Image (tube, helix red, strand yellow):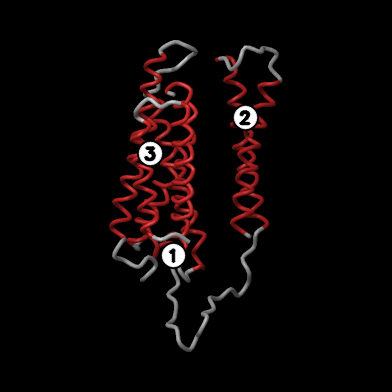
Amino acid sequence: MYSNTKYASTVLANLAVYGILAAFLQSDEAKSGVRPEDLKHFSNAAYIVIASGVVATLIFYALTKEPKGYQIKLLNDSSEPAVKQMSFSNWLCEPQFYQISALYTLSRLYMNVSQVYFPFYVTFGQNFSKMIFILGCLVGIANCAWMYFPLDKADLFIVSIIFGGVQAVLLVGSLAFTSDLINKNTESAAFVFGAMSFLDKLVNGLVYQIIELFNPECRDDQNNIACTHFYRIIMAYVPGCCLVLALIVLLSLLTKKIGAR
């Protein structure tokens, strides 16, 4: 139930961003599409999103209280060994914390770069097991390699379907691995998910910034060949490299039990 609510809220938040931006653009009297003068609308939308996030975060921390006298309860106190409580400093000394963080971040980076740049590519160019996660990585790598070549409309539909399947496997798989890593140490689960989410956002932002430094500034029909080549390379290499790195990290975990300490 929690996951359903979380992802439904994420979808609504994403739609709200598009709604805010659409309202700003509709308020402009010009009907010639997006122009350099519309930069102010994008800036204002970004300010609203950031301010809303800050306010929501402050409200969450102000109104959410930890239950008093909270203690970890074992399923069978008599038969199971005591669970070692994990503080944030303990997690920072845990090797699997960094391995699962890498899997989580690379999975999100693959998804986000694919979702952000796939429209440009089309416009200008034409509880999971480790083995399923590996299969998802391999299929995703093959899909990225396929996109390096010119595609017709039918191929684009197939590529999109494969993208959706791979993204589902990676997202659910990385979240399942994170839950396995936490195991029964739920007293510090918020730190684990928070740290991975922070790393995910940080790496995504850095990668986007680096990509945009090499953007050939596609405008209408100008520089169209360079744009086609640019987005083809982005969609083939960036998500593909993420999956290769994720596959390497996962292979290092193949013989280990995630969450065993």
Tell me which amino acid carries mark 2: Ala
Q: Is residue 219 left or right of residue 6?
A: left
Mark 2 — residue? 45
Q: Which percent across, then down, holds residue 85?
A: 45, 72
> What residue sits 63% from the left and 41% below the top?
13
Residue 119, placed above or below residue 62: above
Mark 1 — residue? 180
Mark 2–mark 1 Cα distance, whole angstroms, equals 38 Å
The numbered mark at residue 163 is none
The numbered mark at residue 143 is 3
Kindly report which numbered mark, 2 or 3, lies closer to the viewer in this rendering.
Answer: 3
> What residue sits 49% from the left and 34% below the top?
157
Q: Nearer the viewer, residue 58 or 172?
A: 172
Rendering quarter of residue 80: bottom left
Element carrying mark 1 = helix
Q: Which percent across, then down, holds residue 117?
A: 46, 31
The quarter of the picture where the N terminus appears is bottom right
Q: Which percent across, then down, holds residue 98?
A: 35, 56
Residue 191, placed above or below residue 136: below
Q: Which percent across, then down, holds residue 100?
A: 38, 56
Disc nearer the start of the sequence (2/1): 2
